[in-house]
Image (tube, helix red, strand yellow):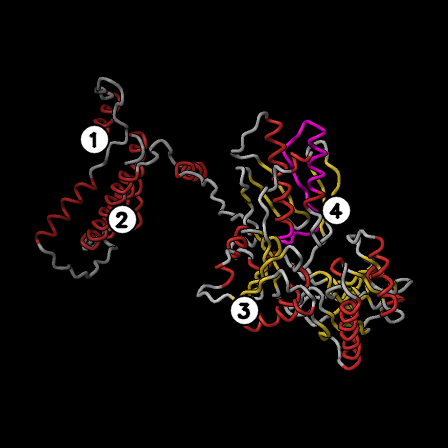
């Protein structure tokens, strides 16, 4: 077991250092070149803030209430976070004044989650004004030391106030513990007096600035150096370390470079890497970390594993153990909370599965968010939960894409196929009963030429009409118009239709003679326009072309061309009529 645990850890001892950039309100705990924890003080509502709020709505259906803390989004107060016994309606009323503390910062479309159980953290103690009693950290294993600390605090604290003794209080003097307790009691008294004088909603208390918070949370015996970027921060760090008797083994330095402190210490590279879904590991494997609204999924892949291994099972075990340590670091760095699903590479040996679960428990032991690990399923999945603390790194340094709105995809326009030109023409032809055989697809040139010829013929007809109107007899004009109409129809029909048109023309002429006689005609006075000789010649040529009827029958498409003999019956009939 011990040899397998060393797969994911380095043999060389690594030192920890703290980087505090007060100008950017960002602090980082680093181990070598890697960032373990990020401390960010950005946002309107921060973790640990105490507000004087008013109750807006009480909803028994969800056993919760919404309170106004003075920001855009309402605070969510669950019934379990309200002190006292009884139903929620009995404990809370609309427009009631209430002192609440932020336990979860607002995320996305959700507002902050608040509680009425106030807790004020210090260096060695945590003050709980509403919960009487004394509790000692589980990490203090010595029973003698636990009894000593408990007896010291019980003599100091006021009646009705609860205290939690932190791990940092181990082996501390009575004077240091008493000083820390007095500072916390003074803060609570200021909150009570402010709540009585101010009108809701209003901010009553905010945790100390970033420097004090980072020193209190991150500074331990493993830290050897603290780097700051201002002279004021340097003096404050030295005074805090001196008061807490921690200035012996820690070196405090002031950064004086031209570049920002976070760039000089490569913290910005770690932040950029934490915003990516893919995380590369030294052995060649990689992780895929994808966060959703409901849970976070982590997929372990071997990739190009470069470490030599005797068997495939050994390669899988080494990759999974290395992934365990990287996952524990990424959870703290990205501040991932809620339900987490880890998909390890499938392992066949039960011993290897137990080794992975044991390694995971050891890797998350230093996490202050108190993760809880479930069992390893047969499919290689591990379920775990982690208490959320503050905003995730993606919510601080990233924003939703204005185009896809955070979906990650862009929906293109639906370019559905349109009906072809032939289909449209055939549909119209079917409705209007037009010939379809002459239509061809992709025959734009011929269609354009035919259209041009038709336009030229129409222009010539318009020019020839005023010349023809100069005739003295309107009956003749009517005859010529009917002939032109019938000529146009004759181009599209066969010879039988032409014979019928000629018979109709004769009948039309007879009707015109019967209606208008030569004696009854009134000779119109029409001024003849002066036309040049060239224009008259062109018009005459065009009129000849238009008067000649086109052949309505198609040319022979087959092999040899044969001339049809004229029908004798028709010729005889014509001669008889003459």
Q: Nearer the viewer, mark 1 or mark 2?
A: 2
Q: CA distance from mark 4 to mark 1?
A: 118 Å
**Label pair 2/4, CB-CB below 8 angstroms:** no
What label sits on residue 23 in the rendered view?
Answer: 3
The magenta-colored residue range is 332-360
**Dot 3: element:** loop
Closest to the observer: 100 or 240? 240
Query: Is residue 335 covered in magenta?
Result: yes
Please provide percent x and percent y for residue 547. 20, 40
Q: Nearer the viewer, mark 2 or mark 4?
A: 4
Local crowd size for mark 1, using a 10 Å CA cut-off: few (<14), some (14–19), many (≥20): few
Q: Quadrant of residue 186?
A: bottom right
Q: Tell me the quadrant of the picture where the N terminus can be found.
A: top right
Q: Mark 4 = which residue?
A: 372
If you read the primary sequence from the N terminus, does the residue marked by circle 3 or circle 1 appear first? 3
Q: Mark 1 = which residue?
A: 578
The residue furthest right is 86
Q: CA distance from mark 2 to mark 3?
A: 100 Å
Please name the residue shown 22% across and 51% down the image: 459
């Amino acid at each position: 077991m011990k040899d397998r645990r060393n797969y994911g850890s380095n043999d060389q001892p690594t030192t920890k250092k703290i980087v505090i950039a007060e100008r950017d309100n960002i602090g980082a705990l680093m181990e070598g070149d890697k960032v373990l924890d990020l401390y960010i003080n950005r946002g309107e509502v921060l973790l640990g803030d105490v507000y004087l709020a008013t109750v807006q709505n009480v909803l028994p259906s969800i056993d919760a209430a919404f309170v106004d803390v003075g920001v855009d989004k309402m605070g969510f107060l669950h019934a379990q976070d309200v002190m006292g016994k009884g139903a929620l309606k009995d404990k809370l009323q609309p427009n009631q004044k209430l002192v609440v503390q932020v336990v979860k910062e607002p995320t996305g479309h959700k507002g902050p989650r608040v509680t009425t159980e106030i807790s004020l953290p210090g260096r060695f103690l945590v003050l709980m004004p509403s919960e009487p009693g004394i509790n000692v950290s589980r990490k203090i294993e010595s029973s003698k030391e636990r009894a000593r600390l408990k007896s010291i605090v019980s003599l100091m604290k006021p009646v009705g106030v609860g205290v939690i003794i932190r791990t940092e209080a181990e082996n501390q003097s009575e004077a240091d513990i008493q000083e820390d307790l007095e500072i916390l009691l003074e803060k609570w008294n200021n909150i009570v007096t402010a709540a009585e004088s101010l009108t809701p909603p209003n901010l009553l208390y905010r945790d100390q600035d970033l420097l004090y918070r980072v020193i209190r949370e991150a500074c331990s015996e493993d830290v050897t150096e603290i780097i700051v970027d201002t002279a004021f921060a340097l003096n404050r760090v030295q005074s805090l370390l001196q008061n807490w008797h921690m200035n012996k083994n820690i070196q405090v330095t002031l950064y004086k470079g031209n570049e920002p402190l976070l760039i000089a210490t490569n913290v910005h590279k770690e932040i950029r890497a934490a915003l990516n879904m893919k995380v590369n590991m030294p052995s060649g494997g990689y992780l895929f970390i994808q966060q959703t609204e409901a849970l976070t999924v982590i997929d372990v892949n071997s990739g190009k594993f470069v470490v030599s291994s005797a068997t495939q099972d050994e390669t899988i075990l080494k990759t999974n153990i290395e992934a365990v340590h990287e996952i524990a670091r990424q959870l703290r760095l990205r501040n991932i909370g809620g339900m987490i699903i880890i998909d390890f590479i499938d392992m066949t040996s039960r011993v290897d599965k137990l080794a992975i679960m044991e390694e995971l428990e050891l890797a998350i032991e230093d996490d202050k968010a108190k993760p809880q690990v479930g069992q390893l399923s047969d499919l290689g999945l591990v379920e775990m939960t982690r208490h959320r603390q503050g905003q995730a790194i993606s919510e601080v340094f990233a924003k939703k894409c204005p185009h896809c709105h955070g979906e990650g995809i862009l929906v293109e326009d639906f370019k559905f196929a349109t009906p072809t030109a032939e289909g449209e023409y055939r549909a119209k032809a079917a409705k209007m009963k037009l010939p379809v055989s002459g239509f061809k697809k992709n025959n734009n040139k011929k269609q354009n030429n035919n259209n041009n010829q038709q336009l030229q013929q129409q222009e010539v007809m318009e020019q020839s009409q005023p010349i023809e109107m100069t005739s003295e007899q309107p009956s003749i004009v009517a005859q010529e118009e009917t002939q032109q109409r019938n000529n146009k129809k004759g181009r599209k029909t066969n010879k039988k239709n032409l014979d019928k048109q000629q018979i109709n023309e004769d009948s039309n002429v007879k009707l015109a003679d019967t209606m208008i006689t030569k004696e009854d005609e009134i000779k119109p006075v029409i001024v003849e326009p002066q036309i040049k000789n060239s224009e008259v010649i062109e018009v005459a040529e065009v009129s000849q072309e238009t008067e000649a009827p086109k052949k309505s029958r198609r040319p022979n498409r087959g092999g040899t061309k044969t001339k049809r003999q004229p029908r004798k019956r028709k010729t005889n009939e014509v001669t008889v009529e003459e």
